[in-house]
Amino acid sequence: MGGVAAGKTTMRKQRFSAGYVLVDAADIFLSLSRGEFLPFPGPLQEPVDLIGRLVAKRALSERRNIVTEVIGAEREALEQLIDALKSIGYSVQGACLTCDVEEAVRRNESRGDDDISAYYAEPFQRAWIIDACNELARRRKA
């Protein structure tokens, strides 16, 4: 978790590449776009959403470790995500990254077409995880 261009993706790749299922709309989008420049999520919104929901649902139903990136600017939305995961027995560990504002601006301005901010991807990821948690909780009660 952290502001735009604070280093979330770099940290995730360094610390959480092995042993975690990545729940990331930007990553799915880039895989589907195959190097073609398209607006996010643009024409790929439907397949990105479908794949993301399936990834989150399967990972959580298999009790796998997951990792995702969030800005975390909306407290209530972040609490909903954490509460949903805890409701199905997950322990949530967060890391909050910060960096100098000038550095973040420099990094953000130098982003390439294949570097989509969590600012845009977070709502997708959050919805996928929360929906998968809610479905699993309903199944357990039935």
Image (cartoon, grey):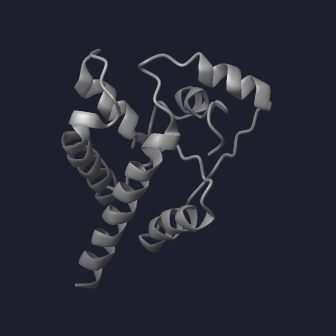
Relative placement, left or right, of 113 versus 32 is right
The residue at the point 56 percent across, 61 percent down is 78
Asked if residue 111 is positioned above or below residue 39 in the image, the reply reads above
Residue 117: image location, x then y, percent: 51, 34
Quadrant in which residue 24 is drawn: top left
**How far across and down, in percent of the image, does residue 42 sit?**
28, 35
* Residue 114 % position (x, y): 41, 20
Position of 139 compared to 66: left or right?
A: left
Residue 86 in sight in this render = yes
Say left or right for 86 vs 96.
Answer: left
Residue 67 shows in the view: no
Q: Which residue occupies the foreground of this view, 142 or 6?
A: 6
Q: Please give the name of the residue rendered at 52% of the width and 42% of the height, measured from the top-left corner.
A: 119
For residue 81, above or below residue 28: below
**The C terminus lies in which quarter of the figure?**
bottom left
Q: Residue at x 61, y 20 (%)?
A: 109
